[in-house]
């Protein structure tokens, strides 16, 4: 599960890199809005992923305690 989370995180970080590259070229107002919105969504997903990872770790820890 942790590998899955890490893979998702790497993918989202790569997406942010592509978004940053795209925002460096001249953009129409609509394109600029779309890029800003997408950047916000990806950044939000990265923040949420940290919380998900913490919950997964907590669940794994509780499962190990209950098994012992």
Image: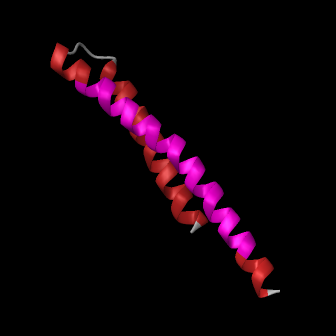
Residue depicted at 29% across the width and 26% down the height: 35
Quick check: 5 left or right of 28? right
Viewer-side residue, 17 vs 12: 12
Residue 61 lies in the magenta-colored region: yes
Q: Quadrant of the C terminus?
A: bottom right
Q: Can residue 28 be seen in this snapshot?
A: no
Quick check: 65 left or right of 44? right
**Residue sitting at the far bottom:** 67
Q: Quadrant of the N terminus?
A: bottom right
Characterize the magenta stretch by its predominant secondary structure: helix
Viewer-side residue, 11 vs 51: 51
Against 17, is 8 above or below? Answer: below
Locate residue 63: give its quadrant. bottom right
Quick check: 65 left or right of 45? right
Q: How is the image coloured?
A: secondary structure
Q: Can residue 57 be seen in this snapshot?
A: yes
Residue depicted at 51% across the width and 46% down the height: 48
Locate residue 29, reporting x and y percent: 18, 14
Residue 1 lies in the magenta-colored region: no
Viewer-side residue, 27 vs 53: 53
Quick check: 61 left or right of 29? right
Locate residue 8, reporting x and y percent: 47, 54
Locate residue 58, reporting x and y percent: 69, 64
Residue depicted at 56% across the width and 55% down the height: 52
Locate residue 5: give its quadrant. bottom right
Against 39, is 32 above or below? Answer: above
Instruction: Look at the image and give the residue range highlighted in magenta.
Output: 34-62
Locate residue 32, reporting x and y percent: 25, 19
């Amino acid at each position: 599960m942790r590998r899955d989370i890490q893979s998702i995180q790497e993918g989202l970080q790569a997406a942010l890199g592509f978004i940053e590259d795209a925002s460096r070229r001249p953009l129409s107002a609509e394109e600029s809005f779309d890029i800003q919105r997408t950047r916000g969504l990806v950044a939000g997903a990265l923040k949420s992923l940290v919380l998900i990872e913490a919950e997964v770790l907590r669940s794994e820890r509780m499962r190990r305690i209950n098994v012992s």
